[in-house]
Image (cartoon, rainbow, N blue to C red):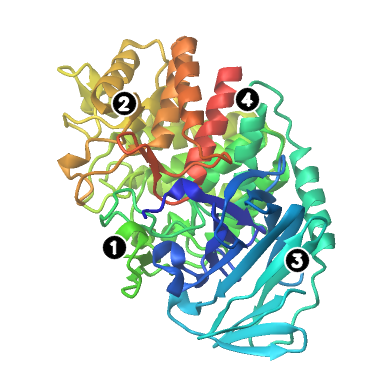
């Protein structure tokens, strides 16, 4: 039976994450960081690659939900003999990372199984399992996992298969804790105390949300997801907690998203600023300054959660991939790409941070100035662009527009906040880029701007032109571009990034619609005064979330299923921004 991305729930402790299938199996988890080797990799293979299934023997009917404003997952099971509830969560990081699962009897009696298959090294390394006092310890190389539970444990072939009965009123907890194999065992985790503390953490965090407009619950759910993708020790924000979930089933468009893209993290920062989460914004800005420290000329478009630069891409040939989608990749070669648009996003974030009351950070402005000096020389060069194409560099219109944004926001920083800058030179540069885009990216035959200079193809990122202020939404060229994008890139009312059969990205065609692009269309429609259309599209996009409010990167309208890494920060950023735009 095929699996669906939307069958999964997301748990996080602000340093790493786990994905839980609706049938109770944790099929993906990396310890101790988002980008560490997985100890459960069944998501990209089978049960033999590591998983932890907890639920009724023979299964049954189920419903699930997050407790409001949190990543505490509750799954209610109903069988012929009774009902149970399984509560899954990861306590915000304390002494050691842990997964806590509590089985509670609600009615009658239910026979429950806990099938624990630990495979370190992305499903390749079988651990040595031993009984140490009241706990089971699985060890291999640098990693160890400690299982504590009052339920009976046992099994064979390096797999634990305890089965037990739960009656109404009974609570059976399980805690699985990671620790370095050379260290002493971590302290006992009290499951009920950990649950109380986790709920208190999320309740306090959710209460800080200042947004109180339409779709508030939907916005808050997306903000919780974005917070869950934050690496609290450094402030870095990952694009997704997974690698190699395909955007084409059976295809090769499988990438590792467990890293911090400056672009994606910057957009997350802006959403946090708009909704009152200034602490997260400050932490990210501090992460940025540390990550790019050193030679500013060598700044990358992405880093690890701690700021490491080496993200070497390689393939895990022992994993068959999600729905046989190969190769499974770890690392990301896009770290070495040239993407000129990133300077625009980062400079805009610096400007918005000050507009929202964050204190100035001299090191951030120093970095920003140097990047602008580089951009003065580089903006005319072709690059790989926002979509990180692997078909060769081109003169992407979006990259040029965002170069204009970089100088526009830098000028505002100087004028409004007194930042020292060669402002007259930057004004000339801003005007030069604007004129260049309007001349070389406009296609009279299409009545639209185009994906690349002198081209005839469209790109959904052209919708960002009015959103960033490059031209007003009432400009006939913008109206023509919005109409052309809707006409040429729509698939069942949703937007593709571009026509991938044109091979601009150097890869086989066939991907679905890219959900952030449809959220951009919502905002573009609002700016044109087409509020009813915008609301209808936004509510259609809300309906594409899974049953607990999560979105992936893409969607296949024909198959009616989500595609790509999950949950995806870019999509949840788009949801929150669109709701705020509709509210305005």
Do callouts 2 and 1 mark residues in contact (Cβ within 8 Å)?
Answer: no
Mark 4 surroundings within 10 Å by alpha-carbon count, few (fewer than 14), some (14 through 19), many (20 or more) = some
Q: Is residue 214 above or below residue 189?
A: above
Q: Is residue 23 left or right of residue 316?
A: right
Do callouts 4 and 2 mark residues in contact (Cβ within 8 Å)?
Answer: no
Mark with earlier residue (1, 3) = 3
The number of discs equals 4
Q: Secondary structure at mark 1?
A: loop
* Label 1 to label 4: alpha-carbon separation: 38 Å
Callout in the foreground (4, 3):
3
Residue 199: percent from left, percent from top: 79, 50
Q: Is residue 237 above or below residue 492?
A: below
Q: Secondary structure at mark 2?
A: loop
Say if residue 425 shows up in the picture.
no
Mark with earlier residue (3, 2) = 3
Q: Is residue 304 above or below residue 228?
A: below
Callout in the foreground (1, 3):
3
Do callouts 4 and 3 mark residues in contact (Cβ within 8 Å)?
Answer: no
Mark with earlier residue (1, 4) = 4
> Circle 2 is placed at which residue position?
492
Q: Nearer the viewer, residue 534 or 10?
A: 10
Tell me what residue is drawn at x 70 percent, y 28 percent: 211
Mark 3 surroundings within 10 Å by alpha-carbon count, few (fewer than 14), some (14 through 19), many (20 or more) = some
Q: Quadrant of residue 528?
A: top left
* Label 4 to label 2: alpha-carbon separation: 24 Å
Mark with earlier residue (4, 2) = 4
> Circle 1 is placed at which residue position?
326
> Circle 3 is placed at which residue position?
173
> Circle 4 is placed at which residue position?
215
* Label 2 to label 1: alpha-carbon separation: 28 Å
């Amino acid at each position: 039976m095929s699996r669906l991305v939307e069958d999964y729930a997301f748990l996080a402790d602000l340093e790493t994450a786990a994905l839980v299938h609706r049938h109770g199996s944790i099929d993906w988890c990396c310890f101790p960081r988002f980008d560490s080797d997985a100890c459960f990799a069944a998501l990209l293979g089978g049960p033999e690659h590591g998983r932890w299934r907890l639920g009724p023997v023979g299964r049954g009917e189920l419903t699930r939900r997050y407790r409001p404003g949190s990543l505490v997952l509750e799954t209610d099971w109903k069988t012929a003999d009774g009902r149970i509830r399984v509560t899954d969560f990861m306590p915000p990081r304390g002494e050691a990372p842990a997964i806590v699962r509590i089985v509670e009897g609600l009615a009658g009696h239910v026979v429950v199984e806990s099938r624990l298959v630990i495979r370190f090294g992305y499903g390749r390394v079988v651990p040595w399992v031993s009984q140490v006092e009241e706990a089971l310890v699985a060890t291999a190389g640098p990693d160890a996992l400690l299982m504590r539970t009052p339920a009976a444990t046992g099994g064979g072939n390096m797999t634990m298969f305890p089965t037990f009965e739960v009656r109404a009123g009974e609570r059976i907890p399980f805690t699985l804790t990671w620790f370095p194999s050379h260290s002493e065992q971590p302290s006992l985790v009290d499951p009920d105390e950990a649950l109380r503390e986790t709920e208190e953490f999320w309740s306090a965090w959710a209460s800080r949300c200042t947004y109180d407009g339409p779709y508030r619950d939907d916005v808050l759910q997306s903000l919780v997801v974005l917070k869950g993708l934050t690496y609290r020790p450094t402030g870095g924000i990952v694009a997704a907690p997974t690698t190699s979930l395909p955007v084409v089933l059976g295809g090769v468009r499988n990438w590792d998203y467990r890293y911090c893209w400056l672009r994606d993290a910057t957009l997350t920062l802006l959403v946090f600023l708009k909704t009152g989460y200034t602490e997260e914004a400050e932490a990210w800005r501090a992460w940025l300054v540390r990550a790019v420290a050193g030679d500013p000329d060598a700044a990358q478009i992405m880093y690890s959660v701690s700021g490491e630069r080496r993200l070497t891409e390689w393939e895990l040939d022992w994993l068959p991939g999600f729905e046989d989608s190969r190769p499974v990749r770890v690392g990301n070669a896009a770290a070495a790409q040239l993407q000129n648009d990133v300077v625009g996003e980062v400079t805009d974030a610096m400007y918005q941070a000050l507009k929202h009351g964050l204190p100035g950070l001299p090191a951030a402005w120093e970095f920003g100035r140097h990047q602008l000096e580089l951009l003065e020389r580089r903006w005319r060069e072709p690059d790989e662009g926002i979509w990180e194409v692997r078909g060769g560099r081109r003169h992407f219109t979006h990259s040029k527009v965002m170069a204009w944004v970089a100088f526009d926001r830098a000028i505002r920083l100087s004028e409004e906040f007194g930042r020292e800058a060669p402002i007259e030179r930057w004004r000339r540069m801003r005007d030069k880029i604007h004129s260049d885009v309007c001349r070389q990216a406009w296609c009279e035959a299409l009545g639209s701007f185009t994906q690349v200079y002198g081209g005839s193809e469209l790109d959904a990122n052209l919708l960002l032109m009015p959103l960033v202020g490059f031209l007003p939404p009432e400009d006939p060229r913008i109206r023509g571009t919005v109409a052309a994008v809707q006409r040429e890139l729509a698939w069942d009312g949703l937007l593709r990034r571009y026509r991938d059969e044109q091979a601009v990205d150097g890869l086989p065609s066939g991907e679905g619609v890219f959900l952030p692009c449809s959220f951009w269309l919502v905002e573009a429609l609002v700016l044109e005064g087409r509020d009813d259309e915008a609301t209808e599209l936004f509510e259609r996009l809300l309906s594409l979330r899974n049953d607990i409010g999560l979105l992936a990167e893409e969607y296949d309208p024909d198959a009616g299923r989500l595609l790509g890494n999950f949950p995806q920060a870019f999509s949840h950023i788009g949801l929150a921004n669109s709701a705020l735009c509709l509210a305005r």
